[in-house]
Image (cartoon, helix red, strand yellow):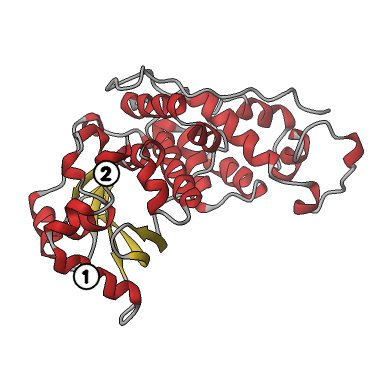
């Protein structure tokens, strides 16, 4: 039997600019996440016969997914309706395997289905701050753009080279020092990131992962609500329910002073605070990008002021 039409999850949040809003609906998040992962699979992907002309929904049917996971259709239906009470880790693993989930997606499913196992301490609601020693370490990293990012994609600390490459965040109010706000609400960042679509997709996937870990984070909910109101691109990407953990890779930039940059980045989770990460960027030795970074370093404060003109991207 085909499934009922899928509902449209609308993130809940306070009015734009507010510091807090209603928590995200964990049951709705679980339901929509499972449906979105099921919809992306075709019977051929999992070795099942495809009677396409009889299908009224995209992807696998619930009974097909239940069969693959080795659970009853009624049980899986309850789970997909957002009822994850008393679900075992073994069943979640079986469903994750049937859905071909990545490690990040499997962790997200576990957070949504059994939040009590992953409940954060009350301190998670407190203001995030980068340790003083960590800030001094950033300052000592001459020639290496680096910053510390925390929950909700908030930028907590950065060095002079990061300001020269990405813009002087010290000129922004503290609440606007946030990668999601910068990427979706500041036009200059569309020009800065050559693959802006990928950067935007990554940011939303990080926020989704964060929301799964902390569905009662009212400030995160308010941020999602504000961006959903202000950015059609954000709404489109949020509705995909993609999740991703910060990792490593290459970012291509088009800097207003030095032109094209190709920088490799590495993400280091802090050992004493898993909710904060240090991100560093570097260029291949003897490359044009390495020379461009040397130029930015030599220009000092002038490069920072002229950088990406962050305040101008309103």
Q: Is residue 138 above or below residue 39?
A: below
Residue 310, labelled with which disc? 2
The location of residue 37, given as percent across then percent down, is 63, 41
Residue 295, labelled with which disc? 1
Crowdedness near tag 2: few (<14), some (14–19) or many (≥20) residues, C-alpha within 10 Å:
many
Q: Is residue 142 visible?
A: no
Residue 155 in the figure: left or right of residue 8: left
**Nearer to me, 80 or 172:** 172
The location of residue 172, given as percent across then percent down, is 20, 38
Q: Is residue 266 visible?
A: yes
Q: Earlier in the sequence, mark 2 or mark 1?
A: 1
The location of residue 120, given as percent across then percent down, is 31, 34
Q: Quadrant of residue 188?
A: top left
Crowdedness near tag 1: few (<14), some (14–19) or many (≥20) residues, C-alpha within 10 Å:
some
Q: Is residue 162 above or below residue 91?
A: below
Q: Is residue 30 above or below residue 257?
A: above
Q: Is residue 270 above or below residue 225?
A: below
Residue 211 in the figure: left or right of residue 29: left
> Residue at the location (80% across, 54% down)?
47
The location of residue 107, given as percent across then percent down, is 47, 45
Q: Quadrant of residue 15?
A: top left
Element at badge 2? Answer: helix
> Residue at the location (71% across, 42% down)?
70
Compute the Cα span from label 2 to label 1: 20 Å
**Nearer to me, 123 or 204:** 204
Q: The N terminus lies in which quarter of the figure? A: top right
Question: Residue placed farthest to the bottom in the image?
Answer: 286
């Amino acid at each position: 039997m085909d499934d009922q039409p899928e509902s449209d999850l609308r993130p809940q949040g306070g009015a734009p600019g507010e510091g807090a809003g209603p928590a995200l609906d964990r049951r709705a998040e679980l339901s929509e996440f499972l449906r979105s992962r099921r919809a992306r699979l075709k019977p051929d992907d999992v070795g099942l016969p495809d009677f396409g002309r009889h299908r009224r929904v995209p992807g696998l049917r619930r009974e097909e997914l239940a069969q693959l996971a080795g659970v009853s259709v009624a049980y899986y239906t309850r789970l997909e309706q957002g009822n994850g009470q008393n679900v075992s880790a073994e069943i979640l693993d079986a469903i994750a395997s049937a859905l071909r989930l990545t490690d990040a997606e499997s962790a997200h499913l576990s957070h949504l289905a059994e939040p009590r196992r992953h409940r954060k301490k009350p301190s998670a609601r407190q203001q995030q701050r980068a340790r003083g020693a960590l800030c001094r370490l950033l300052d000592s990293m001459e020639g290496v753009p680096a910053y510390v990012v925390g929950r909700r994609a908030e930028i907590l600390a950065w060095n002079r080279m990061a300001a020269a490459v990405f813009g002087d965040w010290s000129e922004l109010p503290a609440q606007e020092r946030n990668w999601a706000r910068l990427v979706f609400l500041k036009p200059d960042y569309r020009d800065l990131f050559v693959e802006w679509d990928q950067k935007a997709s990554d940011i939303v996937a990080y926020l989704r992962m964060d929301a799964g870990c902390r569905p009662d984070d009212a400030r995160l909910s308010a941020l999602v609500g504000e961006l959903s109101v202000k950015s059609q691109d954000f709404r489109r990407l949020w509705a995909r329910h993609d999740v991703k953990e910060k990792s490593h890779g290459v970012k291509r930039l088009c800097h207003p002073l030095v032109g094209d940059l190709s920088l490799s980045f590495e993400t280091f989770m802090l050992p004493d605070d898993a909710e904060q990460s240090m991100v560093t960027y570097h260029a291949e030795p003897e490359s044009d990008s390495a020379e461009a970074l040397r130029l930015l370093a030599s220009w000092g404060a002038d490069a920072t002021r002229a950088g990406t003109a962050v305040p101008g991207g309103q």
